[in-house]
Image: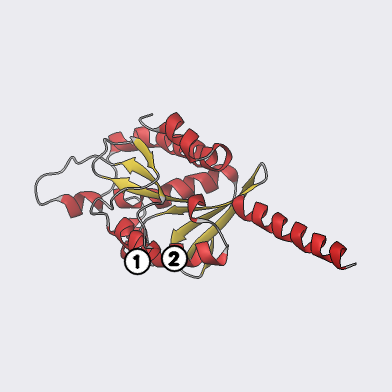
Amino acid sequence: MWQFLLNVFKKKNQNEQQDTMKKYLIVGLGNIGAEYANTRHNIGFKILDHFAAQENITFQTQKLGDIATYKLKGRTFIFLKPSTYMNLSGKAIVYWLTKENIPLENLLVITDDLNLSFGSIRVKTKGSDGGHNGLKDTQAKLNTSAYNRFRFGISDAFNKGQQVDYVLGEWTNEENETLKERLDKSIELIKSFGLAGINNTMNAFNGK
């Protein structure tokens, strides 16, 4: 009898571990408020909103952010748009990683990047914060720079001293014409992250 109960307990633990490994936290960085909705700095929010619209899923306001859940081929993707504003993004990320018992390797943080040309994609498993306040807080709260990040290029087409205005500025008409295709590509990337893994995703999407 005891051996039977022990086997049941072991199997339950194994199933829980397998379920944990199939859960992913996809975080889009951005600032809350209508005035930020279509700004370059909010590309993380924009990508997740585009994904939700395409797959007919809805966000609900919960602790420290808006949350949506998407299931695909046995995987569970939890989308998070932090409500902490950019500078405290890490607080929301750590809370939801812990609440959902998601391993760090299943985290993907989506952010804008001034050092990449508009629409360029770069996925990395570690790196510096590059002066990005959202990544800076994420690194501080996680106590590591070794976490997956998806950088979306917004280019550096601004004059000296105009960086803040540029980052918090809205997309140009020309950029908006190209943006939909880039958003579609971003959806493919997120699905690949869960289904094919980070290394295959980097090989398939970096520079594309």
The foreground one among 171 and 110 is 110
Query: To which quarter of the image does residue 158 belong?
Result: top left
Q: Residue 137 location in percent, x, y?
A: 32, 63
Residue occupied by mark 2: 92
The foreground one among 207 and 18 is 18
User: Who's the residue at 81% across and 61% down the image?
Assistant: 8
- Give the colour scheme shown: secondary structure
Q: Residue 18 location in percent, x, y?
A: 66, 52
Cβ atoms at labels 2 and 1 below 8 Å apart: yes
The foreground one among 110 and 40 is 110
Dot 1 falls on a residue whose secondary structure is helix
User: Who's the residue at 13% across and 50% down the image?
Assistant: 162
User: Who's the residue at 18% across and 40% down the image?
Assistant: 157
Q: Residue 193 location in percent, x, y?
A: 51, 41
Q: CA distance from mark 2 to mark 1?
A: 8 Å
Q: Visible in this render: residue 58?
A: no
Q: In this view, which residue lies farthest toward the left?
A: 160
**Quadrant in which the N terminus appears:** bottom right
Q: Is residue 99 left or right of residue 43?
A: right
Query: To which quarter of the image does residue 175 belong?
Result: top left
Q: Residue 122 location in percent, x, y?
A: 36, 38
Residue 149 is marked as: none
Residue occupied by mark 1: 88
Q: In this view, which residue lies farthest toward the right?
A: 1
Give, as a three-letter code, the residue at label 2: Ala
Badge 2 crowding class, 10 Å Cα cut-off, few under 14, some 14 to 19, many 20 or more, is: many
**Quadrant in which the C terminus appears:** top left
Dot 2 falls on a residue whose secondary structure is helix
Give, as a three-letter code, the residue at label 1: Leu
Q: Visible in this render: residue 65?
A: yes
